[in-house]
Image (tube, rainbow, N blue to C red):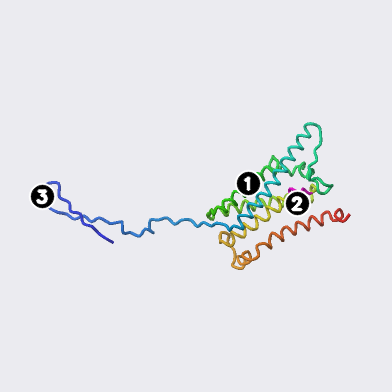
Amino acid sequence: MALTEAVRVSSDGIGGMSKTTVKDVSMEPESEHAEIAPRTEGGSRALALLLVITGAAGLLASWVITIDKFKILEAKVEGKTFTPGCSLNPVVSCGSVMESKQAAVFGFPNPMLGLVCYAIVIGVGVSLLARARFPRWYWLTFNAGCLFGVGFCAWLMFQSLYRINALCLWCSLAWVATILMFWYVTSFNIRKGFLPAPPWLKGFFGEFTWVMPVLHIGIIGMLILTRWWDFWMS
């Protein structure tokens, strides 16, 4: 480390000299002062497109259901009835689902929540297409939002099949979109090490991510098929 000498003359005018050593900080390693930047990751183009497409599908479903819900309410005020276009038969009956108490769990129509959440998903997808990179906390927060979405959809599926006894096609589209985005975002976080997982699980998601959403959607399809088996076969 370099040292410099400074000569100082005493204030009484006497020519006595004293040495003062000054520490030269210009030669210190910069690593001691520089902060370590947080790790950031950007998703692949395929993940970005999947988020944009599934977000758009969910947004479309939420928009249509919201409009139909308002039309149902307007018809009730006028003393009339309104039948949504996706009410095809006693089983595939969007109107029955929209008028149920489960359709407004938080005190307002559920699709209004979808309008906000799916728009956020589209925003994340577009950002990834623009090669944006996000830190670990961002990806985990996004994953938590997807987990809430898929959990909420699972509850709505149960209510639809075994309590309301009717199926909404637009709701089904939103379910499929949410399931796809959840599994692919979860796979990304596991493969990047943002979610702790054993090596074999990372390897599985690296090669067979598609298996989980296919299996998930397949199970729902089988539940729908068996729930109204007699109706489908008639």
The amino acid type of the residue labelled 2 equals: Phe
The amino acid type of the residue labelled 3 equals: Ile
Q: Residue at x 78, y 42 (%)?
A: 84
Residue under label 1, please give it: 119
In the visual, does 59 lie left or right of 30? right
Of tags 3 and 1, the one toward the viewer is: 1
User: Are the two marked residues, 3 and 1, in contact with CB atoms closer than 8 angstroms?
Assistant: no
Estimate the x, y position of residue 42 in percent, counting from the top left.
55, 56
Residue under label 2, please give it: 158
The amino acid type of the residue labelled 1 equals: Ala
How far, Cα to Cα, is label 3 from label 1? Answer: 80 Å
Q: Is residue 170 magenta?
A: yes
- Residue 14, numbered label: 3
Q: Is residue 198 magenta?
A: no
The local crowd at label 1, few if under 14, some if 14 to 19, many if 20 or more residues have their Cα within 10 Å, is: some
Q: Residue at x 56, y 59 (%)?
A: 194
Estimate the x, y position of residue 128 in percent, counting from the top left.
57, 53
Q: SS at mark 3?
A: loop
Estimate the x, y position of residue 132 in percent, counting from the top left.
53, 53
